[in-house]
Amino acid sequence: MGYRGKVVEQERARDLRAEGKTLVEIAAELAVSKSSVSLWVRDVVFTPKPRQRPMFRSPSPLHLAKLAEIDEMNRRGIERIGTLTDDAFFAAGVALYAGEGGKTDGAATFANCDPGMIAYFCAWLRKYFPIDESRLRVRLYLHVGLDLDAAEDYWSRLTGIPRSQFGKAYRAVRDPSIRRNKQSTVWPESTTRVPEPTAR
């Protein structure tokens, strides 16, 4: 005849399974063993619910430790080097452009999301090359939902380039299927486009 005990629990387990509950959740709710639940619902079609992930995560201890280490290295570097000489300033700008810059269509470009690097690159260009300020261009890569006006104002003040010389921003749509550990950035990436510099 088979096991006929706990008929009410069996029916409730089948209903919960059809709703997408896991075996562990059902067993906990009905105060029965997981093996019993598995036996009761073995022929019920199960469609798992999509996992709900928080929009923003707290930074992990490892990430916080890494940021603290970076801050400490920056502090030591400033303490050791102090003010860069002209030669060091020029060499650092060349290295920065080599790593983050590019040349297309008769223009030099630089893309980065670090405000310090963007400010350094702009200062480097203005110091060593005769730049026509009216030809400078900035384009932002900004996630949908972020304040475009505030972002343009921020980068305009940082670069010294008027907002009238900003191109149309690229608005990125967040892909919820991509797992991200870091959800916050000061501002999105900025691309600075400048005329091809001519050395003196």
Image: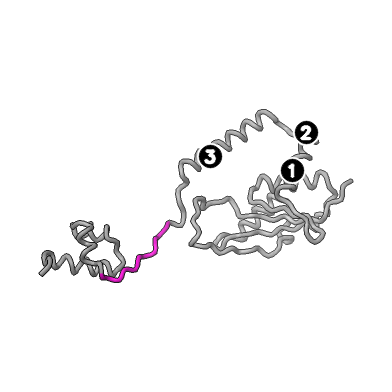
Please name the amino acid that badge 3 sits on.
Answer: Lys
> Can you say which quadrant of the picture contains the N terminus?
bottom left
Q: Are marks 3 and 1 in contact (CB under 8 Å)?
A: no
Mark sitting on residue 66: 3
Q: Position of residue 190 (x, y in %)?
A: 66, 55
| Residue lying at 27% horizontally and 70% vertically, measured from the top left | 44
Which secondary structure, mark 2? loop
Residue at 69% of width from left, 59% of height from top?
139
From the image, state whether disc 3 or disc 2 is nearer to you: 3
Asked where in the image residue 29 lies, by quadrant, the reply is bottom left
What is the C-alpha distance between the residues marked 2 and 1? 15 Å
Q: Main secondary structure of the magenta part?
A: loop
Q: Earlier in the sequence, mark 2 or mark 1?
A: 2
State left or right for residue 56 relative to residue 151.
Answer: left
Give the answer, above or below, for where 113 lies relative to 2: above
Which of the 4 image quarters holds residue 47?
A: bottom left
The answer to if 38 sits in the magenta stretch is no
| Label 2 vs label 1, nearer the camera | 1
Identify the amino acid type marked 2.
Answer: Thr
Residue 64 image position (x, y, % from top left): 50, 41
Asked whether, in this view, residue 104 is left or right of residue 58, the answer is right
Q: Residues within 10 Å of mark 3 (few under 14, many from 20)?
A: few
Counting residues from the start of the chain, the first of labels 3 and 1 encountered is 3
| Label 3 secondary element | helix
**Residue 182 image point, x, y percent:** 51, 50
User: Marks 3/2: CA distance?
Assistant: 29 Å
Looking at the rendered structure, the secondary structure element under dot 1 is helix
- Rendered image: mark on residue 85: 2
Q: Which residue is mark 1?
A: 95
- For the residue pair 173 and 119, the one nearer the viewer reads as 173
The region drawn magenta spans 43-53
